[in-house]
Amino acid sequence: MDIGVRKIATFVEETIIEGGKAAPRPITMTVVAAVVKNPWAGQGFVENLRPEIMRIARPLGLEMTRRLIAVLPRERVEAYGKAAIVGVNGEIEHASALIHTLRFGNTFREAVSGTAFLSFTNTRTAPGALISLPMIHKSETGKRSHFITATFQIADAPGPDEIVVAIGASDGGRAHPRIADRFEDMKEMEAELTAPELVSI
């Protein structure tokens, strides 16, 4: 099926030292980004985006997922996320349309046995801009060690009538996490609210 892919780029980053200290183990982040023709470009305001979502989202998700797990095996994935960036002639809604559908996201989530939502960015920019792809732990949403971001750029994308669609994964969190998880904060705050010195009389 021709879904308008111009190029696919894969980025791999391995963190060995962070903050001047060796990581307990190297941490690998991988991003697969597809540059696709914006199917709504040049049509003015399109009310119903669904036909093109149905045509593009699932095959795009399948191919990108296949490529990502070929680089970072599914059993190693701990954190994940996604991003979509539309060119200057498009709406941010066009970028959102291709990634905010279960036909795209579930392909990736199920392949790596994830249960959490895929954190995301959707924005508009010019070719060559630095793109951020946020990630969270694939099943423990409060695990702050895995609040991480991959960054990448494609020199000639997105063109004005293109969309960059990306998925990312990591086999670990930050190299030296030193802040509490969200759920620990919640317990501490609950204890603080019930401490005798804070109780109103």
Image (cartoon, rainbow, N blue to C red):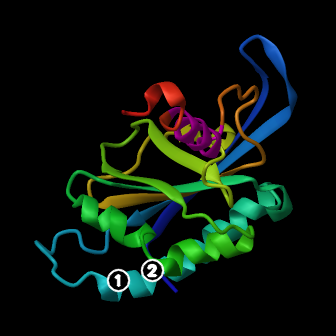
Q: In this rendering, is residue 199 above or below 90?
A: above
* Residue identified by numbered label 2: 56
Residue at 75% x, 25% y: name it: 176
Q: CA distance from mark 1 to mark 2?
A: 6 Å
**Residue 156 x/y as whole percent:** 41, 45
Tag 1 residue: 52
Mark 2 belongs to which amino acid? Ile
Residue 48 visible (yes or no): yes
Magenta span of residues: 181-192
SS for dot 2: helix
Give the crowd class for mark 1: few <14, some 14-19, many >=20 residues within 10 Å. Answer: some
Question: Where, by quadrant of the figure, is residue 94 drawn?
Answer: bottom left
Which quadrant holds the C terminus?
top left
The relative height of residue 4 versus residue 196 in the rendered view (above or below) is below
Please tell me how crowded label 2 is: few (under 14), some (14-19), or many (20+) other residues with Cα within 10 Å: many
The secondary structure type at the circle numbered 1 is helix
Q: Position of residue 107 (x, y in %)?
A: 62, 76
Are the two marked residues, 1 and 2, in contact with CB atoms closer than 8 angstroms?
yes
Looking at the image, can residue 154 be seen? Answer: no
Q: Position of residue 89 (x, y in %)?
A: 20, 57
